C-alpha cells in the first residue's frame, strides 16, 4: 500500500533523505517534492567552486530529471508551498493542493540581512543559491568591477575569493577582530588574512558598517563605515549568518523555537510531520553545516520506514573551500574545565597548529597551512580516544606515533644532508655540517662561512642544534637569555626581526617568530606591544590589554587595589588655581594621603578605581593632564628656578625644562625616562643622575645622559656641549628616540648605553646630523599619535571603570 | 543552574576582564578570545590583588600585584599551592550569561 509523502524543499538534507528512502523502501511512498527554487537538488556547497570558475553548474547537480522520472517523484519545482492545513492533511502550493499521509519540512534557512539603511537596494544580495552565484559571476565580465562583502565567515570569504578569481576588486568588511572567529583563533585568522591579501582581496577587520549608499538610479554604489570610510561597490554581498526558515511551520501551528522543534526521530510536535536540515532545532541546537544534516536524513528515512533510529548531534569540522587557503577546525574551544593548549608553528611554511586538550582527551583542533592530519585529529575528537600515551608527540600527527623520538636533537640528526635549514639563503644541512667540520666552532663562524641564519634568523635554533650534534660536548651553547618561556629568541632578536621582516602586528610576531603560546604571557606581551608601537607608530595600534594595569588604567595601583593620581606639573611649576583644583579633588574623592613626590609634583593616593574618570574630568577642567607617573614613558622634568630668580642662574632652566616636557610627554619608552635641567653647576635639580640631565652654563648647555639614582647610582656621561637651547632640545629628543628604537624593554637608558657604547650613541645623535634629524622626525611622527592626554580620553568613557554588573541587587531564589 | 544575562561580550575587552559585584564578593569575567569567557574570584589569594586588573594571556591571568599566574579553567595558581574559585559562565548570541545560583544566594544565618 503506497502512501502520500510530501516533501517541502529540495535541499541538501531532503535530497539525502530521499535517497535513503528509495534505498530501503522504494515502493512504499508516492512522493511529491516541492521546491521554491526552479530546479531540483544540486550540491549547494559547491556553489563556491562554481563561482570561482573551477566547476560548472551541471557538474554540481546531484539529482537530474532522469532520477526524478525513474523514481516516480512528482516534482513541483519553482513552486512555493504557501500553507499547510493540518486538519485536512493537505499542503497548499501556489498551483494547487496535495494531500499527505506524512509531511517533511526541509525548508532550509534564510540568509540574515543586517537592517542597515539601504539593505534593500538593488545591488545588495545574500549568498545562498544559484541566482546569487550568477549575479556575482556576471560582475567578472565587467572590467574594473568592485564588490564589497560584509561578513568574514566561511560564506563571505568563499564569495570574496570566488569573485576575486573572476577578476573583481573585492573588499571584505568584518566586524570582529579576526576572520572566521567561530572556527579559528587569532593566529589562524592572521594567516588566513595574509593568504587572502596575497590574492588581492582587501580585508578590514573591526569594521562597523553604517549605511549602504545609493547612486542616482537608486542602485547600491558604496558601503559607508562608521569611521566615515566609503567603500565603492557595484555589488554588495551580505554573508553574516542564517536564520532557520520556520515561517510556514509556524503558521501551520507546529512548535517552533529558533527552529522547528524535532525529537531525536526527527518528528515535530505533529506526529505525521517530520522535519530536517537547517530549518530544525534539536535539543537547543540549530545547524549550519551538512554533516549532521546527513545523519538526520538517515534517521528520518528510518523513522518513516517504521524502524528505530535516533539522531545524535556530533562534533563538526570545517574547511574553507578557497584554493590556497588551507585551514581546518574542529571541536570546541569555547568551553570546558581544565583544558590545555599545544601550539606548533612553522613560520617559514606559514603553518600553525593548535590542539586543545581536556584531561586525556583531544577536544578541539585548529590548523592552518598544513591540514593533512585534520581527519586524524577530528577522529580523535569524535571518538574521545585517550591521547595520554602520545601527548608529547600528538601535534606532529599520526606519523610521529609509534615510538619515534620527540627529542629535537635526534630529529635534527635524522635530517638528510640536503634538507634545507636556512630558507632565506638556501643553505642545506650538508653545507652547514661541512662548515662545522671544517673548523667553524660557533654560530658566528657558521654564519660567516655559510650565511645560514644570517638573514631572518628564525633558523638560528636549528643551526645551534647542528653545532651540538656535530661537535657534541665540544660545543658550548650560548647563554643568551630568551625573552621568556614563550620563545627561545632574545629581546634583541625580536626587536631586530620586527624591523627587518617586517612584523606589524602581535599575531605576526607570534606566528612568524614561532611563539610557543597562543598570545604570549605577562612578561613578553608588554615588551612586544612596545616594540611594535615604537617601530610602527602608524600601522600598529597600541593594545591596552598587553599593558600592566597602571598603563591600562592610567593610574598607579596600590597594595589595597585603590589607585594614586598624579597630575602633570610642567617643569615642577604650578599655579594657585591648579593647587585649588587638586585640593578640591583630594577632598571630593577622599584621597587618603596627599604627598609631594620626589619628582616635583603632587600625588593623590587612595582613589577608588570607579572614581578615576570623574577625578580626571575635574582635574582636566582646571587644565591639568596626566602626569604619567605610572608609565614606561616620560615621567618628570625636574627644574630649578634658574635665571628668572636665582642670583647664580645662567640660563632659563625652568623654561627649558617645560619645553622638554611639552615635547616629550605622552611618548612610550622601553622604561621610564626622567629628565632634569639645572640652572648652574650647583645642580639644584639633581640633573647629573637623570636619564637625560642638562646643566646650564654661561656658554650654553651641557647635555648628559645615562645617569641613575634608583637601584643603581651613576653619574651622567656627557653627550655634548651645545651653545643653543634648541640644540639641547634636539639632542634630547634624538637620544630618546634612539633609545626607543633600540633598547631592550625594561632597560633604563644607563643600562642600554652600557651595552651599545656611548660612542655609537654620539655618532647617531651628535656627529651624524642627518641621523639626528631623522631620529627627531621619527619621534615627531610617533608623537603625532601619542602626545595627548589619556585622562581626557578615558574620562569620556567612564563605563569601562565601573563593575560590569551587580548581582547583589538580584533577588535570591 | 540559574543563568543571568550580565552583559554583551563586547563590553569585556578582548584579552581583558571586567568585574561584577556578587554576594560572594567581586567576581572577574575574563575574555580570552572572541568567543571565550571565564569567571573566577577577583581576589588573589596571595595578598588580595584585583585579578580583573591583571594581564590575560592564553587561558591564564597574571595578578597585577606580584605576578602570580592562574589557570582560568581550574583556578589553580601555577607553581603555588593556591587556587581561586571559578564559576560557570557562557556566551549565547553575543551575550554573557553567568550561573548566578551561588552568586546571588543570601547567606544562611
Ligand atoms: C611617588 C614617588 C615617591 C614619592 O612619594 O616621592 C614614587 C613612587 C613609586 N616609585 Fe619611584 N617614586 C617617585 C620618585 C622616584 C625617584 C626620584 C625622582 O624621580 O627624582 C626615583 C629615583 C630615580 C630613578 O628613577 O631611578 C625612583 C625610583 C624608582 C624605582 C627604581 C628605578 C630604577 O631604574 O632603578 C622604581 C622601580 C621601577 O621602576 O622598576 C620605582 C617605582 C615606584 C612605584 C611606581 C612602585 C610601584 O611599582 O608601585 C611607586 C608608585 C607609588 C604610587 O602609587 O604613586 N621608583 N622613584 C615618586 C614619584 C615621582 C613623580 O612625581 O612621578
Ligand atoms: C555557498 C555555500 C557554501 C556552503 N559550503 C558549505 C561547506 O563547505 N560545508 C558545509 O557543511 N556546509 C556548507 N554550506 C551550508 C550547506 O549548504 C547547508 O547546511 C545545507 O545546504 C542545508 O541543507 P537544507 O536541506 O537544510 O537546506 P537547503 O539546502 O537550503 O534547501 C532548502 C530548500 O527549501 C526550499 N524552500 C524553502 N521554503 C520553501 C517553501 N515554502 N516551498 C518550497 N520550497 C521551499 C528552498 O528554496 C531550498 O531550495 C554552504 C552553503 C552555501 C550557501
Ligand atoms: S622608595 Fe620604595 S617604597 Fe618608597 S615610593 Fe619608592 S618604591 Fe615605594
Ligand atoms: S596579590 Fe596577587 S600575586 Fe600578590
Image (cartoon, helix red, strand yellow):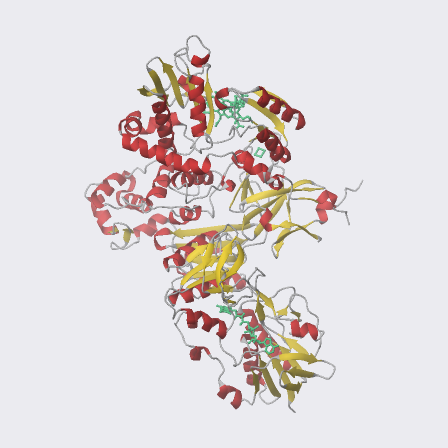
- Numbered marks: total: 0
Q: Does residue A782 show up?
A: yes
Q: Answer with left or right where residue B29 lies relative to residue A492.
A: right
Q: Does residue A387 show up?
A: no
**Residue occupying the point 64% across, 24% down:** A584
Is the residue B54 above or below the residue A404 in the image? above
Which percent across, then down, holds residue A601? 53, 21
Q: Residue furthest left?
A: A438
Q: Which residue lies furthest to the right in this view?
A: B109
Is the residue A221 above or below the residue A612 in the image? below
Q: In which quarter of the image is residue A25?
A: bottom right
Q: Answer with left or right where residue A654 lies relative to residue B32.
A: left
Q: Residue furthest bottom?
A: A1
Which percent across, then down, holds residue A82? 65, 79
**Residue occupying the point 21% across, 47% down:** A434
Which percent across, then down, holds residue A718? 33, 20
Q: Which of A165 and B87 is in front in this view?
A: A165
Q: Which residue lies furthest to the top in this view?
A: A647
Q: Answer with left or right where residue A221 lies relative to residue A198.
A: right
- Which quarter of the rendering shows the C terminus of chain B? top right
Which percent across, then down, holds residue A43? 49, 75
Q: Answer with left or right where residue A175 lies relative to residue A279.
A: left
Q: Nearer the viewer, residue A309 or A300?
A: A300
Q: Nearer the viewer, residue A251 or B26?
A: A251
Is the residue A43 above or below the residue A549 in the image? below
Amino acid at each position: 500500500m503506497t502512501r502520500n509523502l510530501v516533501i517541502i524543499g529540495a535541499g541538501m538534507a531532503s535530497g539525502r533523505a530521499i535517497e535513503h528512502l528509495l534505498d530501503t523502501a522504494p515502493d512504499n511512498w508516492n512522493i511529491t517534492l516541492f521546491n521554491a527554487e526552479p530546479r531540483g537538488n544540486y550540491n549547494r556547497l559547491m556553489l563556491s567552486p562554481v563561482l570561482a570558475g573551477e566547476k560548472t553548474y551541471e557538474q554540481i547537480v546531484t539529482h537530474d530529471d532522469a532520477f526524478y522520472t525513474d523514481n516516480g517523484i512528482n516534482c513541483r519545482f519553482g513552486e512555493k508551498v504557501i500553507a499547510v492545513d493540518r486538519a485536512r492533511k493537505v499542503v497548499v502550493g501556489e498551483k494547487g493542493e496535495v494531500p499527505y499521509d506524512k509531511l517533511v519540512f526541509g525548508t532550509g534557512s534564510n540568509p540574515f540581512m543586517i537592517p542597515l539603511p539601504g539593505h534593500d537596494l538593488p545591488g545588495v544580495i545574500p549568498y545562498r543559491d544559484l541566482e546569487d552565484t550568477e549575479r556575482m559571476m556576471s560582475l567578472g565580465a565587467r572590467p574594473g568591477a568592485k564588490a564589497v562583502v560584509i561578513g568574514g565567515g566561511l560564506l563571505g570569504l568563499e564569495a570574496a575569493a570566488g569573485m576575486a578569481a573572476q577578476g573583481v576588486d573585492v573588499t571584505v568588511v568584518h566586524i570582529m577582530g579576526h576572520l572566521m572567529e567561530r572556527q579559528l583563533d587569532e593566529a589562524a585568522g592572521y594567516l588566513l588574512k595574509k593568504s587572502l591579501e596575497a590574492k588581492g582581496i582587501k580585508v578590514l577587520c573591526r569594521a562597523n558598517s553604517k549605511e549602504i549608499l545609493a547612486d542616482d538610479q537608486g542602485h547600491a554604489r558604496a558601503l559607508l563605515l562608521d569611521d566615515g570610510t566609503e567603500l565603492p561597490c557595484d555589488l554588495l554581498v551580505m554573508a553574516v549568518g542564517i536564520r532557520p526558515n520556520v515561517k510556514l511551520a509556524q503558521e501551520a501551528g507546529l512548535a517552533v523555537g529558533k527552529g522547528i522543534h524535532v525529537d531525536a526521530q526527527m518528528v515535530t510536535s505533529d506526529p505525521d510531520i517530520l522535519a530536517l536540515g537547517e530549518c530544525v532545532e534539536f535539543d537547543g541546537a540549530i545547524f549550519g553545516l551538512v554533516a549532521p544534516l546527513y545523519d538526520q536524513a538517515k534517521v528520518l528515512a528510518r523513522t518513516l520506514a517504521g524502524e528505530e533510529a535516533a539522531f545524535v548531534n556530533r562534533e563538526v569540522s570545517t574547511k574553507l573551500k578557497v584554493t590556497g587557503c588551507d585551514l581546518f577546525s574542529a571541536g570546541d574551544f569555547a568551553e570546558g574545565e581544565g583544558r590545555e593548549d599545544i601550539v606548533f608553528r612553522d613560520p617559514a611554511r606559514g603553518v600553525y597548529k593548535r590542539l586543545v586538550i581536556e584531561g586525556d582527551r583531544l577536544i578541539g583542533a585548529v590548523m592552518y597551512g598544513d591540514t593533512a592530519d585534520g581527519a586524524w585529529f577530528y577522529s580523535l575528537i569524535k571518538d574521545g580516544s585517550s591521547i595520554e600515551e602520545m601527548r608529547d608527540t600528538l601535534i606532529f600527527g599520526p606519523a610521529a606515533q609509534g615510538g619515534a623520538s620527540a627529542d629535537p636533537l635526534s630529529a635534527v640528526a635524522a635530517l638528510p644532508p640536503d634538507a634545507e635549514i636556512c630558507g632565506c639563503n638556501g643553505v642545506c644541512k650538508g653545507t652547514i655540517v661541512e662548515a662545522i667540520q671544517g673548523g667553524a666552532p660557533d654560530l658566528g663562524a657558521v654564519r660567516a662561512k655559510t650565511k645560514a641564519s644570517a638573514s631572518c634568523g628564525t633558523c638560528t635554533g636549528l643551526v645551534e642544534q647542528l653545532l651540538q650534534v656535530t661537535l657534541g660536548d665540544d660545543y658550548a651553547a650560548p647563554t643568551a637569555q630568551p625573552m621568556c618561556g614563550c620563545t627561545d629568541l632574545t629581546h634583541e632578536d625580536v626587536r631586530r626581526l620586527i624591523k627587518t621582516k617586517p612584523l606589524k602586528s602581535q599575531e605576526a610576531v607570534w606566528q612568524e617568530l614561532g611563539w610557543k603560546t597562543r598570545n604570549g604571557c605577562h612578561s613578553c606581551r608588554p615588551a612586544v606591544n612596545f616594540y611594535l608601537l615604537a617601530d610602527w607608530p602608524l600601522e600598529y595600534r597600541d593594545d591596552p590589554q598587553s599593558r600592566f594595569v597602571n598603563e591600562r588604567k592610567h593610574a598607579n595601583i596600590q597594595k589595597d587595589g585603590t589607585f594614586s593620581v598624579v597630575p602633570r606639573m610642567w617643569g615642577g611649576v604650578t599655579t594657585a588655581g591648579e593647587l585649588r583644583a587638586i585640593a578640591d579633588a583630594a577632598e571630593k574623592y577622599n584621597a587618603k594621603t596627599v604627598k609631594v613626590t620626589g619628582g616635583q609634583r603632587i600625588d593623590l593616593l587612595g582613589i577608588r578605581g570607579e572614581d578615576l574618570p570623574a577625578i580626571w574630568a575635574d582635574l582636566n577642567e582646571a587644565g591639568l593632564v596626566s602626569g604619567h607617573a605610572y608609565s614606561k614613558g616620560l615621567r618628570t622634568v625636574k627644574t630649578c628656578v634658574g635665571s628668572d630668580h636665582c642670583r647664580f642662574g645662567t640660563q632659563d632652566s625652568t623654561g627649558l625644562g617645560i619645553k622638554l616636557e611639552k615635547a616629550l610627554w605622552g611618548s612610550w619608552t622601553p622604561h621610564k625616562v626622567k629628565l632634569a635641567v639645572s640652572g648652574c653647576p650647583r645642580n639644584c635639580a639633581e640633573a647629573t643622575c637623570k636619564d637625560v640631565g642638562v646643566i646650564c652654563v654661561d656658554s650654553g648647555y651641557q647635555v648628559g645622559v645615562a645617569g641613575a639614582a634608583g637601584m643603581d647610582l651613576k653619574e651622567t656621561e656627557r653627550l655634548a656641549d651645545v651653545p643653543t637651547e634648541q640644540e639641547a632640545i634636539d639632542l634630547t629628543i634624538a637620544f630618546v628616540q634612539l633609545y626607543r628604537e633600540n633598547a631592550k624593554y625594561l632597560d633604563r637608558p644607563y643600562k642600554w648605553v652600557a651595552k651599545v657604547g656611548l660612542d655609537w650613541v654620539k655618532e647617531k645623535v651628535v656627529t651624524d646630523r642627518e641621523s639626528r634629524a631623522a631620529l627627531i622626525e621619527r619621534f615627531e611622527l610617533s608623537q603625532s599619535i601619542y602626545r595627548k592626554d589619556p585622562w581626557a580620553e578615558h574620562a569620556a568613557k567612564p563605563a569601562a571603570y565601573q563593575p560590569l554588573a551587580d548581582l547583589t541587587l538580584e533577588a535570591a531564589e | 543552574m540559574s543563568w543571568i544575562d550580565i552583559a554583551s561580550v563586547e563590553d569585556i575587552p578582548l584579552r581583558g576582564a571586567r568585574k561584577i559585584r556578587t554576594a560572594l564578593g567581586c567576581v572577574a569575567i575574563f575574555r580570552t578570545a572572541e568567543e571565550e569567557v571565564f569567571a573566577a574570584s577577583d581576589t588573589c589569594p596571595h595578598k588580595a590583588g584585583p585579578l580583573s586588573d591583571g594581564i590575560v594571556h592564553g587561558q591564564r591571568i597574571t595578578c597585577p600585584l606580584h605576578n602570580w599566574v592562574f589557570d582560568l579553567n581550574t583556578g589553580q595558581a601555577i607553581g603555588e599551592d593556591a587556587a581561586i574559585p571559578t564559576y560557570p559562565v557562557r556566551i549565547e548570541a553575543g551575550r554573557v550569561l553567568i550561573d548566578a545560583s551561588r552568586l546571588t544566594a543570601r547567606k544562611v544565618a
